[in-house]
Image (cartoon, rainbow, N blue to C red):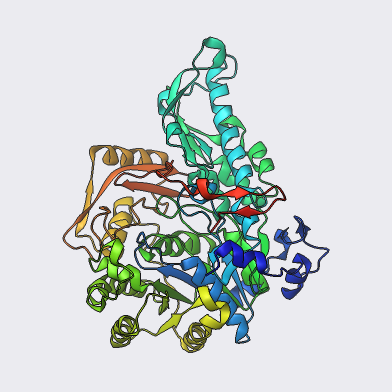
Amino acid sequence: MPTDIEIARKAKLLPITEIAQMLSVSPEVIDPYGRFKAKLPLALIDNAAVEKCNLILVTAISPTPAGEGKTTISIGLTQGMNKIGKQTTVVLREPSLGPVFGIKGGAAGGGYSQVLPMEDINLHFTGDFAAIEKSHNLLAALIDNNLQSKSRGLGIDPRTVAWKRVFDMNDRALRQVVVGLGGTGNGVPRETGFDITAASEIMAILCLANDLGDLKQRLARIFIGFRYDKTPVYAADLNAQGAMAALLKDAIKPNLVQTIEGTPAIIHGGPFANIAQGTNTVIATRMGMSLSDYVVTEAGFGSDLGAEKFFDIKCASAGLKPKMQVLVATIRALKYHGGASLKKLESPDAAAVEKGLCNLEKHLENAAHYNLDVVVAINRFTSDTAEEIAVVQKRCEALGFPVAVADVWAHGGDGAKKLAETVVSVIESTKKKFTPLYDWSLSVKEKIETISQKIYGADGVKYTEQALKDLKRIEKLGLQKLPVCIAKTQKSLSDDPKKIGRPSGFLITVREIEVAAGAGFLVPITGQMMRMPGLPATPAAEQIDISDDGVITGLS
């Protein structure tokens, strides 16, 4: 069986100008980055077309170490939609170099359901992450410079500065550092650290901004800390927003590429879903909706994280109206949630599948809170048996949810035709209209508790002393009407990663609540959230190489 990169290398890519023409975009309008990548100008966004487009969200059950394949299904579904005559574009997030060199080894789909050129997409791409990193670190430099300045200092209390630096690589040694050592000429010594670039608030801001003007306003609102007199300090107080936005002048434009079958794909932005909103940019989604009849997009991790934030933050903020959800499940993941060990996930076990269906059922129930139809997509693997698949189909049909098997890794769009037909049938017959889970005007506690009880299935919420102090600070800053972006483990519906399946009888514990005023949301933190991952014992980087003639190997 060929690897993903071997399959990708054999594909014949179309010139990016031809991909643009499929979207009725003139080659003169795009900004090419070589022969197979291009930036799309924001002027192409058409709000009237956005209103008419059918937006489909691909989400999943709770993730497992076996992987569920949302990106692969998203790409395969898009190819399948085009094969049945429905003009469709897939809109995805950009991969972070951290996971590429850490565990995954790549994040551009797989098999015959990939976006290309996969090496470029996984490695630097068009430089968006680098621009976000530089913009973020410019603000950090300006903060330390202001702390050092005697004539123009704002009186910032360095103990209150929450703004760290970022770096797009897994490097645990950078989590906690001390800067300003070596004498008075090197700055004010203080404790800080690094997050991975995907966790940057600049990433979250870029992904929620409507245009360049909105981007600058959001950058200006970034909360930095407090002065010694207890008054708040924002990026605008440092006159930072203009220079930061200048670094993002190209990064704000969505990236146009293609799938392995030559259908249009837009890739832009890449925030994590367990600590940020986990979806591509509002601009990219609107771009796809302006140029296509259907758009397939995805949200990170399970529906309790990515989908909830997609609906309650991104859609509510941007006024997007999704038509339906596709919920991805795998037989392997259902076995895991049913108690099977990782070593036995490829062994037939219909009983474990049956037991693990409780997790799928909870995610299906969550869709009802948004008044959206759901189609279950079984992402087929070669180890799946007919008996195991039948268990899932029978339960979905009993619950009244359409279900389709998708074999997109091996067969690309042809393997998604049944799923595509089911999706189109649901969209054409539905009378449902999307509604968010909660009103932003609720109190911060009410918003947290609504998500915890309705989406996670918790009995309630417990707040630490620090979290209660943070609530008072949020009130003082006048930010209580912002939505909440709960940071939670992706491995469980609860805040305990060990509780798989469908846990019950638990409380969600909020340790602290961070302010992301620029992005426009609050971040209640549950459990131990890792914003700078470390490399595993055997990192994927050890398998990645490049030959003397420039051929890359090891990406998957």
Residue closer to the observer: 126 or 332: 332
Left or right for 215, reference 475: right
Left or right: 343 with respect to 147? left
Place residue 114 in its image quadrant.
bottom right
Look at 55% across and 67% down and name the residue there: 2
Residue 126: % across, % down: 67, 51
Relative vertical location of residue 386 with respect to residue 134 in this rendering, above or below: below
In the displayed structure, does residue 248 sit left or right of residue 403? right
Asked which quadrant contains residue 383, the reply is: bottom left
Q: Position of residue 337 (x, y in %)?
A: 27, 66
Q: Is residue 551 visible?
A: yes
- Residue drawn 62% across the image and 65% down it: 8
Outermost right residue:
28
Q: Is residue 189 above or below residue 514?
A: above
| Front residue (pair 199, 16) | 16
Residue at the far top in the pictured view = 183
Vertical position of residue 70 compared to residue 271: above or below: below
User: Can residue 321 be spotted in the picture?
Assistant: no
Tell me the residue at 75%/55% (across/down).
Answer: 33
Q: Considering only vertical position in the picture, is 371 above or below 451?
A: below
Residue 247, image quadrant: top right
Please tell me which residue lies in front, 207 or 217: 207
Front in this rendered view, residue 16 or 261: 261
Residue 149 % position (x, y): 57, 17
Count of marks, rendered view: 0
At x 34% / y 64%, what residue is drawn? 62
Q: How far across and how far down the image is residue 22, in percent? A: 73, 75
